[in-house]
Amino acid sequence: MEIVPNFSLKKYNTFGIEAKAKQFVAIHSIQDLTTILQENKTQQKFILGGGSNMLLTKDIDALVIHIDLKGKKILEENEDFVWVRSQAGENWHEFVLWTIDQNFGGLENMSLIPGNVGTTPVQNIGAYGTEIKDTFVSCEAMTVANQEIKIFTKDECHFGYRESVFKNEIKNQYIITSVVFKLTKKNHKINTSYGDISAELTKNNISNPTLKDVSNAVITIRQSKLPDPAALGNSGSFFKNPILLKSDFEKIYKKFPEMKYFDISETEVKVPAGWLIEQAGFKGKRFGDAGIHKNQALVLVNYGHATGQEILNVSKNIQDTIFKIFGIHIEAEVNVI
C-alpha cells in the first residue's frame, strides 16, 4: 500500500480529464482502508470509486483513496431467491454479467452501466424501468471519522430518483465497502416495458426472453446510443430527467404540445432531458474538444483534450438555454468536482 504524490487521474475518470491528485493510494482490503484513515486523520480526503459519475474541473488537493475492494459471495439462498454480496471495487457491468451467468435475475436491465458496485447505491442508479433500490438489501460502510462499520438497510438509504442518503444527509461521511442484493432464482420478473427493449427483442424474433436476452438487448441499445468511455470520454447521462408537478407541466405543455413526458404519479410528470436538449439544438454540437454526443443528447463528451471546466461550461450553456426556452431547470446527474 503506497501513497503516491502528484498522481495523474486521467485513467481514473471516464471523461478522461487530465487532473492530478496531491496524493493517491489504492485500497485492496478493509484493513488497508482502516490504516489509511487512521494514519491520515487530519488530511483532506477524496474517495474514488470507478470514476464514472464525476467531472474533474481542477486538481484534487487531497489524499485520493481509490476503493479497489474485490470479491463476491452468495450469502444465503432458498428455492426462489439468492442473497449476493459484492465488494465495492467490483466492476458493475462484470458483476451484472456474473449474476446472469448464475441465472440470478433482477439486474439485467442495468447492463453496461459504467462504474463500480460500491457507488451504485449513492446514485440509486437505474435504467430501462429498474433501479438499484428494487434489488438492494443493504450495504456495509465505514465511517471516515472513526472507522466504525455500519450496515445501512434499504429504508435507511432514503432512495429517490438518482438520490440517496449518501448524496445528501451523510455526504462524505461514509465509505461503502460492500453491497448485498436479493435476486430471483426462478419466476424472474422480466421487464421489457421500455419500447427500445421490446423493439430489439422483436427484431431478433425473441418472444419469451431470458435474462441474457434482455441483457443483450440493453447492451445493444446502449452501445448504439452511448459512446464507449475508452474511445470517447464521457460519464453516461450527464443530466437528470426533470420531474415537474402536473399543474406546472400543463402550463408548459400548452406552449409545447409535442413535448414528451411520462406520468410517474398522480401529481408528477417526468420529462426526458434528452428530448429538451435535442429540441434546443445541442445534439451533436461541438465546442472545441467538449461536446454533445451525436446519438444521445444526454451525453456530454470529451473529444480528446477538453478540460473539465470546458465541459462544465457546455453543461451550463445547455441548462441556461433549456430554461430560457421551456422554463424547465435540468439538474446535472454527474458530480462536479
Image (spheres, helix red, strand yellow):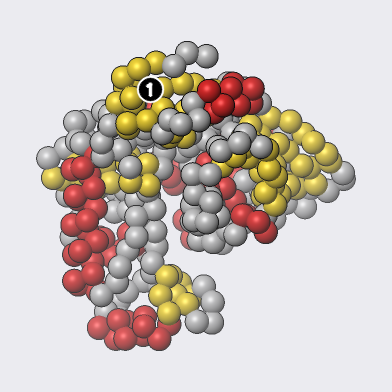
- Mark 1 lies on a secondary structure that is strand
Q: Is residue 120 visible?
A: no
Crowd tier of the residue under label 1, counting other residues whose Cα lies within 10 Å: few below 14, some 14–19, many 20 or above:
many
Residue 273 or 26: which is nearer the viewer? 26
Is 257 located above or below residue 320 in the figure? Answer: below
Question: Which residue, as the protein is rendered here, is positioned at the far top?
Answer: 2
The image shows residue 51 at horizontal and vertical percentages of 42, 35
Report the residue that reaches farthest toward the left.
288
For image coordinates 58% across by 22% down, the residue present is 35
Q: How many marks?
A: 1
Q: Closer to the camera, 115 or 178?
A: 178
x and y percentages locating residue 185 in the rendered image: 78, 44
Horizontal side of residue 290 vs 179, given as left or right: left
- Rendered residue at 52%/35% (across/down): 116
Left or right, 320 with respect to 115, comes to left
Relative vertical location of residue 322 with respect to residue 117 in this rendering, above or below: below
Q: Quadrant of residue 73?
A: top right
Please, is residue 127 above or below residue 33 in the view? below
Kind of residue sitting beneath label 1: Gln
Question: What is the x, y in percent for residue 183?
Answer: 72, 46
Q: Which residue lies furthest to the right in this view?
A: 79
The C terminus lies in which quarter of the figure? top left
Residue at the (39%, 16%) spot, across then down:
4
**Residue 227: image x %, image y %?**
34, 39
Residue furthest out toward the front: 42
Work out whether residue 21 can be spotted. Answer: yes
Foreground residue among 99 and 72: 72
In the image, taking residue 197 as reference, residue 8 lies left or right, namely left
Looking at this view, is 103 or 13 the one in front? 13
Q: Residue at x 55, y 55 (%)?
A: 165
In the rendered image of this protein, does residue 265 appear above or below residue 281? below
Which residue is the site of mark 1? Answer: 23
